């Protein structure tokens, strides 16, 4: 399938995990993939993987909390390709602690990356999409943003905030031809789960009717659907992809 043929797709946090799987899935769908992540070398490796799939792919070192750098990367992409069709605001971090133990640094850092970083990228890219009269913005929320989670005050707030962004931008940008949606993954096997003890992971799996963690490709395929014209009437939605955790 080539549902994203020649669409210019910018994906943040694309060096590993769900971001990398999304870049590869989009590459298979014919997209021109623009991968952005903190460090140049992992991005370059991820770009090579997308190119090996036959896609046009390029990488950028980008910290989404650095507004000047976000503006510079977006300018560069626009100068090269003339447009950005899809933005996947995927970059995100955790820094867990119970409410009473959480430091202000932990709180600020997670809000900075997961919320302010999403705002930076969307605000800059929205200008280009509105000018084009089309575009898709996809935001990474989480089941934690819907139901909360022990030890994740900062992360839950950021992911709930992303849902607020999504609904607000869907209202503001919808009339201008831009769709905005969020995906709320359950527990997906990526390095972000690395700090969670095996016992807790086993308990998480028991809460999932499918009795397993998700795979990054299972989130990427939902992003691909939302990015494509197959989802042409989907706007302001939050799609939970969790193996049925909430039922
Ligand atoms: P991951 O840790 O494997 O990958 C995250 C990527 O984001 C990394 O490559 C990292 O370098 C990059 N990144 C971190 N800070 C950045 C910054 N300031 N600027 C640019 N890039 C930055 O995580 P993942 O599991 O693939 O998660 C991807 C997204 O999905 C995150 O937003 C996460 O919160 C969300 N999510 C993940 C899960 C899960 O279970 N894995 C569940 C729900 C939501």
Image (cartoon, rainbow, N blue to C red):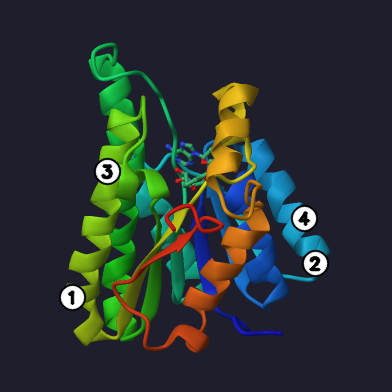
Depth check, mark 2 against mark 1: the one in front is 1
Disc on the earlier residue, 4 or 1:
4
Residue 49: numbered disc = 4
**Looking at mark 4, is its residue's CB closer than 8 Å to ligand 1?**
no
Crowd around label 2: few <14 · some 14–19 · many ≥20 (10 Å): some
Crowd around label 3: few <14 · some 14–19 · many ≥20 (10 Å): many
Crowd around label 4: few <14 · some 14–19 · many ≥20 (10 Å): some
**Residue 98 lies in what quarter of the image?**
top left
Which residue is located at x 63 percent, y 69 percent? 26
Disc on the earlier residue, 2 or 1:
2
Across and down, in percent, residue 132 comes to 34, 83
Disc on the earlier residue, 4 or 3:
4
Q: Which residue is mark 1?
A: 171
Confirm or deny contact between disc 4 and disc 2 (CB under 8 A).
yes
Q: Which residue is mark 2?
A: 53
Which residue is located at x 56 percent, y 27 percent? 200
Left or right: 53 as drawn, with respect to 79: right
Which residue is located at x 54 percent, y 69 percent? 222
């Amino acid at each position: 399938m080539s549902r994203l043929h020649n669409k210019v797709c910018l994906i943040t946090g694309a060096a590993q995990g769900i971001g990398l799987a999304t870049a590869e899935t989009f590459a298979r769908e014919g997209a021109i993939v623009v991968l952005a992540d903190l460090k140049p070398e992992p991005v370059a490796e991820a770009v090579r993987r997308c190119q090996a799939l036959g896609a046009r792919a390029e990488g950028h070192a980008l910290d989404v909390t650095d507004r000047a750098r976000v503006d510079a990367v977006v300018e560069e992409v626009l100068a090269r390709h003339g447009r950005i069709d899809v933005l996947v605001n995927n970059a995100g971090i955790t820094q867990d602690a119970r409410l009473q133990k959480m430091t202000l640094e932990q709180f600020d850092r997670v809000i900075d990356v997961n919320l302010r970083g999403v705002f930076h990228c969307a605000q800059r890219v929205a200008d280009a999409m509105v000018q084009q009269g089309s575009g898709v913005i996809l935001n990474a929320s989480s089941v934690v943003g819907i139901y909360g989670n022990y030890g994740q005050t900062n992360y839950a707030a950021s992911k709930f905030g992303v849902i607020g962004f999504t609904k607000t931008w869907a209202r503001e940008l919808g009339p201008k031809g831009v769709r905005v949606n969020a995906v709320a993954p359950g527990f997906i096997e990526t390095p972000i789960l690395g700090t969670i003890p095996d016992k807790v992971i086993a308990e998480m799996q028991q809460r999932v009717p499918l009795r397993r963690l998700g795979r990054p490709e299972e989130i990427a395929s939902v992003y691909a659907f939302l990015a494509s014209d197959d989802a042409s009437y989907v706007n302001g939605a939050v799609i939970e992809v969790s193996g049925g955790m909430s039922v």
